Image (cartoon, grey):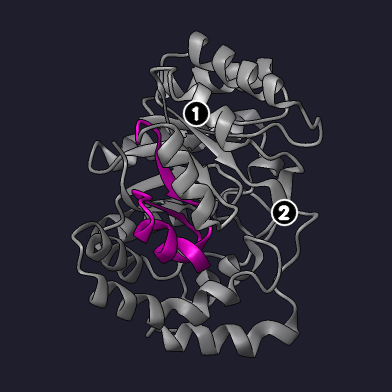
Amino acid sequence: MFKGSMVALVTPMQENGEIDFKAFDRLIDWHIDAGTDALVIVGTTGESVTLTEDEQSKLIKHAVKKVNGKIPIIAGTGSNSTAKTIKMTEKVMHSGAHAALIVTPYYNKPTQEGLYQHYKKISATVPIPIIIYNVPSRTACDILPATIARLSHVPNIIGVKEATGSTERCREILALTQTKMHVYSGDDVTALDLMFAGAKGVISVTANIAPALMAKMCACLLNADFAQAISYNNQLRALHKAITMEVNPIPTKWALHKMGLISAGIRLPLLPLSQQYHAQMLEAMQAADIKI
């Protein structure tokens, strides 16, 4: 089972948009040293939709080799095509990833039955642990708790990344699945609340910038040290909000560049963080005791 602080890792890029594998290695080493519990590679934060299939495969293979079993690797493989998702999920399984994070099909707007059949088909074809990713604010597609409950009977569908930020949704999923389906927060602002409600961890954007603090907060929650967890979260609160000033991963990559960890590269149609948000981002980083 995956738990704790799982970073939705950015994909470092040069100014020309080429992937920077040396910076990628630096980030991986940094996260291992900071206590991050798992790496999510080529997810939404990793700009998966602008990466080619070949680039995605190279990043996952590179991460598996670099990590060398020290922490789990979860690979983003979802698309709005069931066949394409199966193909990518097979690739990451053979590359050595420990699980696949599969977003609900975007733009197509399938029915709940269509969503059920989509995930059932993938899981039946590729025997890798699967985490459903529900982020209706981006996909215009919301997989409902009743559908997740049906999928909880599929052996290799082990969890759901719930990015609605709703503690009620988290409790409903856990109740309907009799806790067979693990819930992971996909929203940093409400991650503390979801873990209070029974979530096993967070797939975090904030952890890109403050990995040690996020790891400590999650560890405290899992060990029922709630007072200390709240203290860590208070320190991170401004950062949680700042990384949403512009669409993810724009603020996160800007912050990492300021920290000297990556170049400023980001792929169109995304652009670097607007000047008007720089001061606010720096203040949030200082509140989290991040060195610039």
Q: Which of 83 and 27 is in front in this view?
A: 83
Can you tell which quarter of the image residue 195 is in?
bottom left
Q: Residue at x 42, y 43 (%)?
A: 183
Amino acid type at image mark 2: Arg
Q: Residue 7 carries which label?
A: none
Q: Which mark is residue 267?
A: 2
Q: Earlier in the sequence, mark 2 or mark 1?
A: 1
Q: Label 1's element?
A: helix
Amino acid type at image mark 1: Ala
Q: Label 2's element?
A: loop
Q: Is residue 77 visible?
A: no
Q: Which residue is denoted by mark 1 in the rendering?
A: 149
Residue 203 among those drawn in magenta: yes
Q: Residues within 10 Å of mark 1 (few under 14, many from 20)?
A: many
Question: Which segment is the magenta one?
Answer: 179-207
Horizontal side, residue 282 vs residue 141: left or right:
left
Residue 172 among those drawn in magenta: no
Q: Can residue 287 be seen in this view?
A: yes
